[in-house]
Amino acid sequence: MDKKTIAQNRKTQIIETALKLFAEKGYDNTSVDCIIRASSLSKGGFYHHFSSKEMLLEEIAQMFISDIMQIAYSIDQQTHLSALEKLNSFFLKVNQLKKERPVEVILFMQELYEGDKNIRLERIVFQYSQHMLLPFVRGIVKQGIDEKTFRTDYPEEAADFFTKLFLIHQQEMGALFMKALSDHGPDRFDIILRRYSFLQNTLENMLGIKQGDLEISHIARDILDDIGRRFTELPSKRSPDR
């Protein structure tokens, strides 16, 4: 095994160990020393890859976004799909990924929207997501116009606005989600679902398609219930260290 492979395996080991500890103890209650001990590596082994726990968290966030973009790339290669089908497939598969990886999703929500807000991480997630997602959305909009499914005189501006609006909306929904978790009533997610319906309606109008063509609000209910249930099973950011 060459040195590059060994180094990558150690980096993966650190990330997997950290995620396991974050799920068990919470991010704030997991120190770098704890990660080092659990991963059976030296301090030098950790700091060779990450300068701090915060840098480790940012790497995990970028890896998660990259996995989302792999979904986008895979969908984009399916030439038999229409532009509308690609969009709905993207929303569905991204939410499936979130359900499969609740530790990362909840970790990011806690750091971004619970207690003291991690402004640096929020900025990194937004800018990296926008950079990665925009080319995919531009391609979808162009395809939709070519198919005469989407109707807009401003395709580039529509793609840019679509991407920014979607990402800003995700930030707002994360904050509302964290607030809703303190309410255990059956309608605790109603305002979030209403906002998703508004987002869907706005994007449909912008693309010139009929109401109900996008499946954003339909998918939102499923992911909210799933992540909400899993959230109660993981430690809070404010949990005392033990």
Image: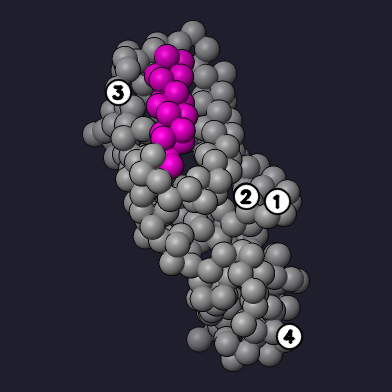
Q: Who's the residue at 61% across and 64% down the image?
A: 237
Would residue 116 be found to the left or right of residue 213 on screen? right
Mark-to-mark CA distance, 4 and 3: 53 Å
Of residue 79 and residue 49, the one placed in the foreground of this image is 49
Circle number at residue 44: 4
Asked if the residue at tag 4 contacts the one at tag 1, i.e. Cβ–Cβ closer than 8 Å, the answer is no
Q: Is residue 16 above or below residue 72?
A: below
Q: Which residue in the structure is indicated by mark 2?
A: 113
Magenta-highlighted residues: 188-207
Mark-to-mark CA distance, 2 and 1: 6 Å
Residue type at the position of mark 1: Lys
N-term mark: 4 or 2: 4
Q: Main secondary structure of the magenta part?
A: helix
Would residue 106 be found to the left or right of residue 87 on screen? right
- The answer to whether residue 161 is seen in the rendering is yes
Of residue 101 and residue 131, the one placed in the foreground of this image is 101
Neighbourhood count class around disc 1 (C-alpha, 10 Å): few under 14, some 14–19, many 20 upward: few
Question: Which picture quadrant has residue 56?
Answer: bottom right
Neighbourhood count class around disc 3 (C-alpha, 10 Å): few under 14, some 14–19, many 20 upward: some
- The answer to whether residue 70 is seen in the rendering is no
Q: Nearer the viewer, mark 1 or mark 4?
A: 1
Q: Nearer the viewer, mark 4 or mark 2?
A: 2
How many marks do you count on the picture?
A: 4
Circle number at residue 213: 3
Q: Position of residue 232 (x, y in %)?
A: 45, 62
Mark-to-mark CA distance, 3 and 2: 31 Å
Q: Which residue in the structure is indicated by mark 1?
A: 117
Q: Who's the residue at 50% across and 86% down the image?
A: 1
Q: Position of residue 17 (x, y in %)?
A: 54, 79
Of residue 124 and residue 2, the one placed in the foreground of this image is 124
Residue type at the position of mark 3: Asp
